[in-house]
């Protein structure tokens, strides 16, 4: 059952008045589903939820985990990663430093995928990778690099599409076994990132809506995948402009497969799959 507009407003106002979080620009449809689940799980009315929010800071943090979306996979959307590997990353070879920001990194599978590509291109030593998320709990998981992964075979399929095949030149590719980067236990249903990739990323709690760019630098690549889809169009457009302003010349913005860029800002990028290159 969807929560009505009035209940959504009560929720947004309660969170805003009692924390630094602001969900005013989130899609009502997305918020409705999550608020409904929170009410059901806690057996509360919206009024009781607002009272609880006003009195319990720890509860607010639990609510943030429920509201924020944490969907990510290793080499999700293989075509995007194939393009990165066989086309776009090579364009970064002449740079002295490579700056990458993964916004809404969730549990980190995406940014570890990027590390693997950089390592295979011998670019990892000169890369600085920042990964941020609003949810502090998923960042703890990301730092450890240990994942419960029921779809292990699906993960291996994605990995092999990117790392063991070349869709642009099937005679010019090198098989790179997943054992180079991952330890897999089918019995325990675990995938572990090998130690050589850990501690290569700075994971930070950060609210892209409230804090914008706290790093005082521009980036060669910005990931913001499957985050924008949960925002209203006005906020999406503001963020696209923000990304443009904070990318270096010829920088890359990588968004989700079901996300898109509309309006005048789209003329400032060249699109290929989910990759937008700054013009």
Image (spheres, rainbow, N blue to C red):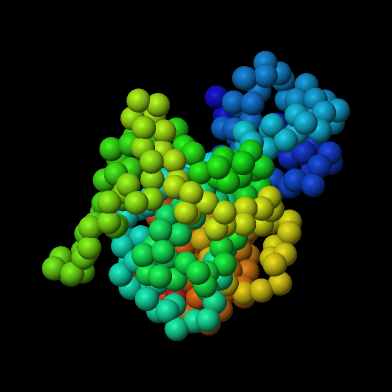
Residue 3 in view: no
Q: Is residue 64 above or below residue 236?
A: above
- Write the residue at 81% across / 33% down: 57
> Residue 161 appears at what percent x and percent y?
26, 54
Determine which quarter of the picture holds residue 130.
bottom right
Q: Which of the pair 31/249 is nearer the observer?
A: 249
Outermost top residue: 43
Q: Residue furthest front?
A: 196
Q: Is residue 149 above or below residue 73?
A: above
Percent x, y for residue 91?
Answer: 40, 79
- Residue under the point 38% across and 50% down: 181
Q: Is residue 48 above or below residue 90?
A: above
Quarter that holds the N terminus? top right
Q: Is residue 1 above or below residue 242?
A: above
Q: Is residue 67 left or right of residue 77?
A: right
User: Which residue of the protein is positioned furthest toward the left in this rendering?
Assistant: 171
Q: Is residue 16 left or right of residue 131?
A: right
Q: Residue at x 82, y 28 (%)?
A: 56
Residue 133 pos. (x, y %): 62, 50
Q: As rendered, which of 251 and 36 lies closer to the eye?
A: 251
Please name the residue shown 27% across and 51% down the image.
177
Can residue 186 be seen here? The reply is yes
Give residue 77's position: percent from left, percent from top. 35, 53
């Amino acid at each position: 059952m969807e929560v009505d507009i009035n209940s959504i407003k009560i929720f947004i106002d309660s969170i805003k008045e009692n924390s630094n979080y602001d969900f005013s620009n989130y899609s009502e449809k997305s918020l409705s589903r999550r608020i409904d689940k929170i009410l059901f799980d806690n057996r509360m009315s919206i009024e009781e939820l607002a009272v609880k929010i006003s009195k319990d800071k720890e509860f607010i943090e639990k609510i943030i985990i429920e509201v924020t979306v944490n969907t990510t996979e290793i080499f999700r959307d293989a075509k995007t990663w194939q393009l990165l590997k066989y086309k776009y990353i090579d364009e970064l070879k002449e740079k002295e430093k490579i700056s990458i920001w993964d916004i809404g990194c969730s549990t980190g599978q995406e940014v570890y995928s990027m590390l693997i590509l950089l390592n295979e291109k011998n670019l990892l030593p000169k890369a600085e990778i920042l990964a941020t998320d609003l949810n502090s709990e998923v960042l703890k998981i990301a730092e450890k690099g240990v994942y419960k992964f029921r779809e292990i075979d699906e993960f291996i399929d994605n990995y092999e599409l990117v790392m063991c095949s070349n869709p642009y030149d099937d005679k010019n590719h090198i098989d790179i076994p997943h054992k180079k980067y991952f330890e897999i236990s089918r019995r325990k249903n675990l995938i572990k990132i090998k130690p050589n990739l850990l501690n290569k990323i700075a994971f930070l709690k950060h609210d892209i809506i409230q804090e914008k760019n706290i790093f005082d630098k521009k980036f060669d690549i910005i990931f913001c995948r499957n985050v924008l889809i949960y925002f209203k169009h006005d906020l999406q457009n503001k963020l696209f402009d923000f990304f443009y302003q904070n990318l270096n010349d010829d920088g890359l913005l990588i968004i989700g497969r079901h996300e898109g860029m509309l309006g005048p800002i789209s003329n400032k990028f060249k699109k290929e799959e989910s990759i937008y290159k700054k013009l």
